[in-house]
Amino acid sequence: MKNLYILVALGGVLAAEHASALNLDLTYYPNTYEANPGGEFTMVPATAADVPAFNVIYNRYSPLATGPGGVGFETFCMDTGTEVRSNPLGATLIPGNVTAGTAWLYSEFAHGLLGADGYNYTDTSVAGGRWKSAAALQSAIWYFQGDIASPAAGLATTFVNDAIAALNLASISNPFQLNNGGFGVDELQLTKTGANGGTLYSQPLLALVPDGGLTAMLLGLGMLGITGARRFIKK
């Protein structure tokens, strides 16, 4: 029983820490391979004071998934209906809103592995191969997030089918289920303060989790502890 209480406490503590693991201001900007509308977008620290916290995330990315000249990390939109606010933006990692299909695809992209599925990381010319790949990946992400009814034909459909196949191998039968930090991917919630002092939400983006998903795993253990404790109490 003591171990169950420890797991419950650990899950609660980690939930609080996970939501505040990122506390900094970011600036986003488009690049020559931005598939407008949608990513890739490049995220960079807004000020020098934000660099240490930013690097905790940035250092998890493959050089292939960083911005032009290796500056910043690349990301994609999570939905189609939220306004993109002006820079700078406050950033917080939020687990729970990313689907398994989206998480798998973005993790593969961010670690430089999506080339095996057809992503062109190298042709960064205007409207070149990377631009076309970005448009396809954005379509696949919007599909898995439930924002569009079907992915675009061609490479986007390939990404979707490859994600489903990979998830099946991981015993995840529903690519639309919430991911809760699995595959080391979370929502990057971006906000700014409005003129009246209220919070304005910007387009949510994707980011790798600083601890590579360890927190999410321990949170799962914490939830198991809660379930076990309930069963114990019922007995």
Image (tube, rainbow, N blue to C red):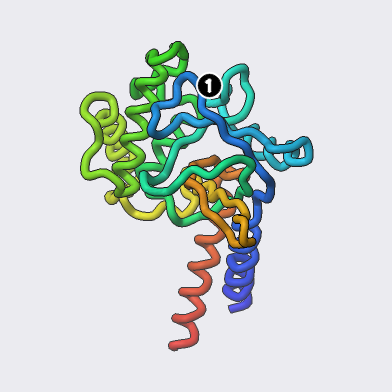
Q: Residue 56 in the image: x percent, y percent?
A: 68, 39
Q: Residue 142 in the image: x percent, y percent?
A: 33, 41
Q: Residue 31 in the image: x percent, y percent?
A: 51, 23
- Check the image and report above or below for 126 versus 74: above
**Callout 1 crowding tier (Cα within 10 Å): few <14, some 14–19, many ≥20:** some
Q: Residue 65 in the image: x percent, y percent?
A: 52, 26
Q: Quadrant of the C terminus?
A: bottom left
Give the image quarter of residue 164: top left
- Check the image and report above or below for 77 versus 222: above
Give the residue at mark 1. Answer: 64
Closer to the camera in the image, 135 or 230: 135
Q: Is residue 9 left or right of residue 85?
A: right
Q: Residue at x 55, y 66 (%)?
A: 222
Q: Quadrant of the N terminus?
A: bottom right
Q: Which residue extends farthest front?
A: 195
- Check the image and report above or below for 137 versus 213: above
Q: Residue at x 65, y 49 (%)?
A: 22
Task: Say what secondary structure mark 1 lies in.
Answer: helix
The three-letter amino acid code for the residue at tag 1 is Leu
